[in-house]
Image (cartoon, rainbow, N blue to C red):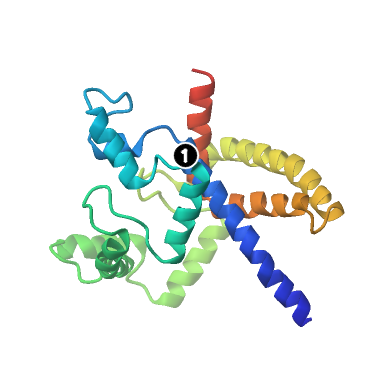
Amino acid sequence: MWQYILKRLLLMIPTLLGVALVVFVLMHVVPGDIALLILGAGEQGGDVNLIELEKVRQKLGLDRPLYQQFFSWVWGIVRLDFGNSLWTGAPVIEELRIRFPLTLEIALLILGAGEQGGDVNLTELDKVRQKLGLDRPLYVQFFSWVWGIVRLDFGNSLWTGAPVIEELRIRFPLTLEIAVFATLVSTVIAIPLGTLAAIRQDTWVDYGVRVISIGGLAIPNFWTGILLILFLIIYFQ
């Protein structure tokens, strides 16, 4: 058993390196030049001094081969050295250290917002609570909420004011279409790759499939969506 655990722990190293490689490649695929951004120029370069541009690229190590940039970037992550902020010029880890307490405080305030009332008109606040039934005992609120679910009465939307069931009725067909299509695509891709990884267990094919799958899970969906949109725009332009 210990050999199995040790083997799995050792397999984490190539897997994490593979995920890091995917993220690194994606950062280079996205259109734009970080050196131009630092100099305040657009993608075309404009009137940027080419000598200054080369100096910035040398400072960032962008003039080195990609494999050297990759290992330098990975080593920086291991040492918690994320470089300097594009906006302030200060180390990113220092920016995180300064902002984390405030970010955590704001998050906690958001979770507990509204309890003190602030400058809100207390009369209006009581009216809203009565309208929502929040002035009733908790057990009454609970059974009222359950009875509403049974009757498919989910109340009104906080943003539009329309009944939630109506909002769901409007959006459900498109959501279902996207979900079915995504499931079909993922099934068509996942089953052959999973089968191939099982047949070629502990080979480069198996490791490659692991890297792709873990990388896909690690990358946020919205980021993948943005990359796909950019790819389609560039490809069909």
Residue at 82% from the left image edge and 48% from the top image edge: 196
- Callout 1 crowding tier (Cα within 10 Å): few <14, some 14–19, many ≥20: few
Residue at 53% from the left image edge and 63% from the top image edge: 147
Camera-side residue: 136 or 68? Answer: 68
The quadrant holding residue 44 is: top left
* Residue 175 point in image, percent of width and height: 58, 40
Disc 1 residue type (three-letter) = His
* Residue 145 point in image, percent of width and height: 48, 64
Work out whether 152 lies above or below 12: above
Q: In the drawing, does residue 123 fall left or right of residue 174?
A: left
* Residue 65 point in image, percent of width and height: 48, 41
Residue 20 visible? The answer is: yes
Camera-side residue: 227 or 69? Answer: 69
Q: In the drawing, does residue 178 fall left or right of residue 196?
A: left
Residue at 70% from the left image edge and 50% from the top image edge: 208
* Residue 213 point in image, percent of width and height: 66, 51
Residue at 72% from the left image edge and 54% from the top image edge: 207
Identify the residue under disc 1: 28
Q: In the drawing, does residue 127 fall left or right of residue 216?
A: left
Residue 226 visible? The answer is: no
User: Is label 1 in a helix, a strand or a loop?
Assistant: helix
- Considering the image in quadrants, where does the N terminus appear? bottom right
Q: In the drawing, does residue 109 fall left or right of residue 226?
A: left
Q: How many marks?
A: 1
Q: Residue furthest top?
A: 237
Q: Residue furthest right?
A: 199
Camera-side residue: 54 or 80? Answer: 54
Work out whether 41 lies above or below 75: above
Q: Residue furthest bottom?
A: 2
